[in-house]
């Protein structure tokens, strides 16, 4: 228990350092935007490629671990689509709905990977690599489809959807990492080392960016979308994933890593996607902030209740 709490405390401390650095103007606003772009387009792909390329995927239960989180995301998607008429009747428009959706379904890879690696070392990284390979493409595909339908009000367009997915750094880095995994032994050492050097800065950069994105001044009056996104992501999603994991017979470190991924707040990149595809970006930022703060309380409670 002490190890888990120490891991969580260290991760959230880095997040708060990012918050303080932006809050007190230690780094210019324009520099934060550039740092965010570098993290999203360079550091994240490098981390994902290196993690998947060199992970010993044969040592972990790929289908069960990947299926638990992906199954949870699919169930949450169906639940939210069933709630869409009720939300519309209560004044939640299409762009706002997409922010609730992203808040309820997407996951913060930075926080999950940081906690898993501190808690379980290389085993945690390998297990998280499985989740990255399965969940990131699935969640990004579903998010793009939801954004296209409800943020822009467009009918499904296969061509546009494929272009959006191909350009997404999470998607192509997963594909590249998986393609390189069988060839890991033949990757020239300088190439592997270069990718590793770039990727090493990703966790710190991602957590700092997440902290810099916190805007506590906008959280004085949480509304229905905020409450729903928090409850669905931090309470309902972990419960759904835990049930699926039990049905699949997942236990030990595998169960712990699955639950770590299920309990983290939404992805920091959700705001970027909302801004790019016509979603409610300010609402998305507020949801991400609220969830990150709330997760400091809910994560240790749920993890202690389910895996310890």
Image (tube, rainbow, N blue to C red):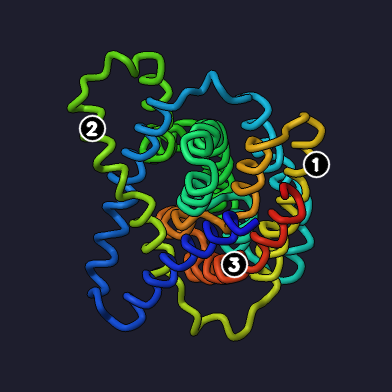
Reading the image, the residue beneath label 3 is: 296
Furthest residue in direction left, as rendered: 190
Would residue 85 be seen by someone viewing this image from the given angle? Answer: yes
Mark 1 or mark 3: whose residue is earlier in sequence: 1
Q: Quadrant of residue 91?
A: bottom right
What's the CA distance linking mark 1 and mark 3?
23 Å
Quarter containing the N terminus: bottom right
Mark 3 or mark 2: whose residue is earlier in sequence: 2
Residue 243: assigned label? 1
Say few, some or many: other residues with alpha carbon within 10 Å of mark 3 (under 14 / 14 to 19 / 20 or more). Answer: some
Residue 93 image offset from top left, x and y in percent? 63, 65
Could you tell me which residue is drawn at 30 percent across and 50 percent down?
A: 201
Mark 2 or mark 1: whose residue is earlier in sequence: 2
For numbered disc 3, what is the local secondary structure? helix
Q: Quadrant of residue 13?
A: bottom left
Residue 168 image offset from top left, x and y in percent? 39, 40
Whether residue 282 sits left or right of residue 276 in the image: it is right
Which residue is at the front of the view, 38 or 224?
38
For numbered disc 2, what is the local secondary structure? helix
Say few, some or many: other residues with alpha carbon within 10 Å of mark 1 (under 14 / 14 to 19 / 20 or more). Answer: few
């Amino acid at each position: 228990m002490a190890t888990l709490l120490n891991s969580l405390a260290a991760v959230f401390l880095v997040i708060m350092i990012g918050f303080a650095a932006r809050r007190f103007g230690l780094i210019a606003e324009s520099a934060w935007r550039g740092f965010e772009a570098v993290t999203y387009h360079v550091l994240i792909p490098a981390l994902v490629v290196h993690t998947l390329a060199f992970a010993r995927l044969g040592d972990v239960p790929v289908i069960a671990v990947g299926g638990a989180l992906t199954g949870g995301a699919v169930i949450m998607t169906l639940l939210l689509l069933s709630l869409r008429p009720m939300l519309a009747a209560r004044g939640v428009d299409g762009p706002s709905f997409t922010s609730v959706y992203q808040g309820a379904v997407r996951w913060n890879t930075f926080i999950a990977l940081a906690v898993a690696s501190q808690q379980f070392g290389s085993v945690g990284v390998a297990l998280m690599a499985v989740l990255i390979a399965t969940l990131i493409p699935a969640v990004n595909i579903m998010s793009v489809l939801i954004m296209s339908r409800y943020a822009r009000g467009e009918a499904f367009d296969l061509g546009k959807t494929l272009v959006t997915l191909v350009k997404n750094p999470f998607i192509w880095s997963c594909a590249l990492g998986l393609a390189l995994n069988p060839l890991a032994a033949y990757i020239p050492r300088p190439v592997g080392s270069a990718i590793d050097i770039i990727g090493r800065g990703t966790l710190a950069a991602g957590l700092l960016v997440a902290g810099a994105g916190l805007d506590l001044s906008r959280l004085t009056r949480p509304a229905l979308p905020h409450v729903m996104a928090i409850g669905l992501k931090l309470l309902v999603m972990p419960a759904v994933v835990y049930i699926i994991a039990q049905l699949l017979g997942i236990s030990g470190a595998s169960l712990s890593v699955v639950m770590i991924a299920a309990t983290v707040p939404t992805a920091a990149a959700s705001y970027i996607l909302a801004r790019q595809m016509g979603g409610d970006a300010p609402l998305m930022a507020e949801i991400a902030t609220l969830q990150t703060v709330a997760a400091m309380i809910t994560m240790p409670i749920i993890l202690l209740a389910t895996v310890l």
